[in-house]
Structure formats: structure tokens, C-alpha cells
Image (cartoon, rainbow, N blue to C red):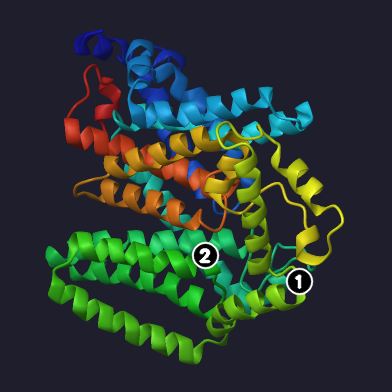
Amino acid sequence: MSTDATTSLASPALPVWRDPVAWAKTADIFAALIALSLPWSTSLTGIFVAAWLVTVAPTLDIRLFLESLKRPISALPIALFALALLGTLWSDASWGVRLYAVSPTAKLLVLPILFYHYERSTRGTWVFAAFLASCTLLMAMSWIVAFYPGLTLKAADVAERGIFVKNHIDQSQEFALCAVALAYPIMMLLRAKRILPALVLGGIALSFVVNMSFVLVSRTALVTIPVMLTVFALLHLKWRSVVIISCATIIFAGLAWTTSSQLRATTGTFLSDYRLYKEQNIPTSIGLRLEFWQKSLRFFAEAPVIGHGTGSTRGLFEQAAVGNLGAAAEVIGNPHNQTLNVAVQWGVIGIVVLYAMWLLHLLLFRGDGLAAWIGLMVVAQNIFSSLFNSHLFDFHEGWMYVLGVGVAGGMTLKARFGETANRPAEQAQP
């Protein structure tokens, strides 16, 4: 279809329900609503994802969309879902468990659609702005419930200090991503001598860091934030700036360590949890992870090529727990490591698909630009945090990956290759 033809189809004479202009803008609004709701509610996120899929469908050019699925960045997420579906055939779990275990990979099917849509849309920044605004509001609520715990929406038996909704892992992942992602626009604003907006964004970024230092932070964030900051320094700063910022970071870290009992307590649990596990077989957080990883490696060695099948993990841990006590008797359906989660179910084949997808998504975000920077940070955070969790398959972190990589990836492709052939004319409008 020619551009002229597309333009004529988007003419004001068309009824709204047939107008691609209306559908495209509505889809962009729902995408922003997904980002807005993600830090707060799984139910709302699911509703908005379904609404986005419905509204984006009329904007698809089927021929071009099918062509886009041949790109490895789109084909590999589909391949991982297909592998999970195929893995149900050799699993010993019940069919209900097998199909339930497929569902965490289904969100990856949204990635190719996001790539296609935001390669044509000019409203991708709406999504990033919505997520930042939502996380900033959540950070404000975190401070409030830290001082007034009764205001939390969490039940009394599971409430955590400074957590208004969800949990400290999800909240720390959000805050860490926002804090590090803001480093790029702050740097660009300073170079353009736009001091006031740079100070505003810098204040927001610092507020996220201070909240994680004095209210509540996950140990995963303590590991991933330095890695993400190192990537930023190596890519965007001169050596003199790196030295200055490193010194400032060390000073801030020292002050935070000295003044924040919460930070000292969180880091102190690394060693204490390990000792309790090794010496007394107590199921501490770190001890359980070590136990899960050891057993998962053994399960992987038993079926290294194609794994034990989709949904097999819990059954394997149940068999291994027989006759054991303490940490060794714990049963889990998720080994808290993305690689091992994939390896146990789908073997080396699954690992190859997973790492190929991660690698190609990293390579997609080579170069400069806000979208490339955000996409790079989303992928890097997911890879490193998945050393301690199965974050690609978790609802919250998994959707952070899909939404962040999908939107940033589409914007990066558009910037790299220019105007896409036959791009709908309505999406040329901001």
C-alpha cells in the first residue's frame, strides 16, 4: 500500500472505528497506561495490555508485520515461547502444571508487536515518562509509609517497611532502573547548559537512591546498580569525569553506610545468612538459593540437551526433598536463577535461545540516544538481576523487560533506519 493510499484511508471522513489515526493514538495511550500501572497493580497491567493488543491490531499491515517477525530480535522471543510450549510434550508434570508453566513466556510474544508499532510511532517517550512519573509517585508513597506504616496497602503479616504495594524486590528494581536511566538525559542537559531541568531530574534520581539507602533495598539491586553505573561511565564519560564521579560515589556510599542502619543490615545479611545455612542448615534467603542452584545443576546434568520439560521443576525438587530436613527439604518451582530455570526445563537448547535473545537485544541498543540508553539498561538489569532471580519469567520484572525493550527497540530501529516504508501517516504526528 502506498503512502498516499494510507493517507487517504486516514482521512477525517472515515468513521472513528475505521480510522487508523484514532486506533494508533489510542494504542499509544494504552501503552502509557501499562507503564503507569505496572509499579502499582498486576491486574490493571493485564487489563491495559489486553486493551493495547486490541487497539494496536487494526494498525498492523499484516504483510509488513510478518516480514518483521523474521528479524532475530523478534524471532528469538517467539522461539523461547515455542520451546516452552513444545516442552510440555516430554514433561512428567500434570497438564495443568505444564500449561501454567508456559504462561510466563507468553509475554515475550508482545515484544515483536512493540518493535513493529514503535518503529512507526513517535509517541514512545510517553511510555518512558509515564513509568518515571509512576515510580516517582510510588517513591513518595514509600517515604510516607516508612513513617506511617498503617497507610500501607499490604496485609499486616506481610508488610515491609517503606512498601506501599507489591514488595521490596519489585520496588528496588523500579527505583534502580529509573535512577540509572536518568543519568543519560541529565548528562545531555548539562552539556546543553540547561541547568534547571538537569537539576530537577538529578534531584529525582538522587531521591530514588536515597530511598533505597535509608528505607528499603533488595540485595539484588545492591549488585546490579554498580554494574549499570559502570556501563554508563564507560560508554558516556571521559576518564577525568569517571574519576570525579567515582570519588563522589565512594563518598556518598560511605555516608550512606555510616548513617543508614537499613543499608548496613541488608548488606550484613549476606554473610550471616550464609553462615546459618552452612553451619545449621537453616533455610535463609542466601542459603536457599545455594541449595536450589546445587540441585538445579544436578537436574540439568540428568537431562542436559532438552531438559526435563515444561513445568517439571517443582516435581524434581519434591523428589529431592524426600528424607531431608531444613534447607535441603525446601520445595520450589523456581530455582531463583533465570539460566537454571531454563536449563532444568529445556536444557542446552533453552540456554542457547535465552542467551542469544539477550545478546541480540543488547546489540540492538548500540549507539547514542535516550531510547538506546534506556533499552541497554533494561536488558543489562534483567541479565544481572537474573543471576539471583528468574526475572524474565516473573510478572513484574518480565513486563519491565518486554515494555522497555519493545518500546526502546522500536524507537531505536526507527532512528537507525529512518522512516519505515509504508509507515501509517497518522503516526507521523506527535
Q: Nearer the viewer, residue 225 or 85?
A: 85
Q: Amino acid at mark 2?
A: Thr
- The residue lying at 49 percent from left, 74 percent from top is 211
Q: Nearer the viewer, residue 284 or 31?
A: 284
Give residue 245's position: percent from left, percent from top: 24, 77
Q: Amino acid at mark 1?
A: Asn
Asked if 290 appears above or below 274 in the picture, the reply is above
In the rendered view of the protein, which quadrant contains the N terminus?
A: top left
**Which residue corresponds to mark 1?**
281
In the rendered view of the protein, which quadrant contains the C terminus?
A: top left
Asked if 228 appears above or below 73 in the picture, the reply is below
Q: Nearer the viewer, residue 383 or 12?
A: 383
Is the Cβ of the residue at disc 2 closer than 8 Å to that at disc 1? no
Q: Earlier in the sequence, mark 2 or mark 1?
A: 2
Give residue 323's position: percent from left, percent from top: 87, 56
Image position of 348 (left or right of 64): right
> Is the residue marked by circle 2 packed among few (<14), some (14-19), or many (20+) residues within 10 Å?
some
Considering every residue shown, the one lying at the far right of the view is 323
**Which residue corresponds to mark 2?**
220
- The residue lying at 76 percent from left, 71 percent from top is 281
Q: Which mark is residue 1?
A: none
Give residue 271's position: percent from left, percent from top: 59, 79
> Is the residue marked by circle 1 packed among few (<14), some (14-19), or many (20+) residues within 10 Å?
some
Element type at marker 1?
Answer: loop
Compute the Cα span from label 2 to label 1.
23 Å
- The residue lying at 36 percent from left, 64 percent from top is 227
